[in-house]
Amino acid sequence: MAHYRRLGEVPPKRHTQHRDPEGRLYYEELMGEEGFSSDSSLLYHRGVPSAIVASEVWELPDQTRTPNHPLKPRHLKLHSLFPPGEEGEQRLSRNQDAVTDRRLVLGNSDVRISYVVAGADPSPYYRNAIGDECVYVESGAGVVETVFGVVPYRTGDYVLIPRATTHRWVPAQESTQPSRLYAVEANSHVAPPRRYLSRYGQLLEHAPYCERDLHGPDEPFLVDGEDVEVLVKHRTSAGIVGTRMTYATHPFDVVGWDGCLYPYTFNIEDFMPITGKVHQPPPVHQVFEGHNFVICNFLPRKVDYHPLAIPVPYYHSNVDSDEVMFYVGGDYEARKGSGIGIGSISLHPGGYAHGPQPSAIEASLGVEYFEESAVMVDTFAPLELGEAGLAAEDPAYAWSWAGRGPDDGNPAVFSNS
């Protein structure tokens, strides 16, 4: 985050005594990035934030990855990973939570993309000590309880959670939809694109959103408790691992904090699409960036207004990137006839020229408005398939531009489901 906030009780000067009404000293914690050289916040705890009484192994869900070899584009149907049960979707996933039931879809050494359908039960307390998390809420509502305070979420939100922030997901009991969460877990920090920021970190006039659109906690969130378990995802020389730490007092004991580092939400409805006379490249849709990857969103918008414009994208070889598109709303014009639908992912890897279905080009001519919503992640290192990516694949997609597969001499029929 770029702008300063202050919640609850903090002393007039940092690193000075701060006591409760009975004279007991609060414990100051600096939570900062890049070795005291970047954004930070100061938190004031009632208990000692380092006091643990146990540390045990937490076995993570399957983190294995399979290379995209032989190279080909992929279509992954995420909704097939958590199908509705006999009593309906909400009932099916009641005991699934937003943390331990995540399934790895795609990943590399910079970023991992997981998917989960969380029911009504809260997640365990959780801390990702590897990097920031940017979780897109495909559907559902609830709150994320954090050491900084409570952050409400709703459909269409990006929930930005800084690295090593203790938190838990609490879906709304009254929600008519389960919380379908698309988690982008970085090995770095996630922030607005640098080209949209002033040298002091303010969002500039040409940015497609501003600070008014970012919603952090409104007040401290105090919880009493002892021997509280927190699941920690972290790194060792062997790779990504998990630890179950037990804290002597509840982590949510912060009476006040101030600084420029904290969780927040941003809803895609508040993104103002940038359009042009002819087709604009994907960077105009960018919303966040991390190390070696970017996040963009393609939203309902007026399209190109040159009299000879072709509104759908041109074929392109983005030679340095793998492109992942998650289709979350509307009818994505360029993929008509490919089998892509709501809840689909398309993976178009570097080394492969991709673009619209041939029939979509002529069909788009003269169109003035696209009614589509998609979240895109572009990575600068090759993506591999997680167990969920392999389980959700539609094998016909790779051949949809040609209309037939390698073992089929006749044109194939592909539905637009």
Image (cartoon, rainbow, N blue to C red):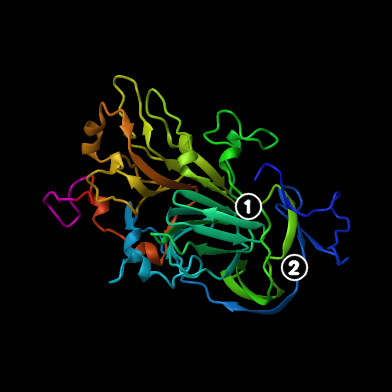
Identify which residue is drawn at 58% across, 72% down.
Answer: 242
In the displayed structure, 270 sits above or below 97; it is above
Residue pointed to by mark 2: 49
Type of the residue with mark 1: Pro
Q: Main secondary structure of the magenta part?
A: loop
Identify which residue is drawn at 26% across, 58% down.
Answer: 395
Residue pointed to by mark 1: 217
Residue 319 visible to an observer of this rendering: no
Structural distance between the alpha carbons of marks 2 and 1: 20 Å
Q: Position of residue 184 (x, y in %)?
A: 50, 55
Region rendered in magenta: 402-414
Between 242 and 30, the one lying in front of the other is: 30
Q: Position of residue 157 (x, y in %)?
A: 49, 49
Between 245 and 407, the one lying in front of the other is: 245
Label total for image = 2
In the displayed structure, 91 sits above or below 57; it is above
State yes or no: residue 37 in magenta. no
Identify which residue is drawn at 33% across, 60% down.
Answer: 79
Q: Residues within 10 Å of mark 1 (few under 14, many from 20)?
A: many
Quadrant that contains the N terminus = top right
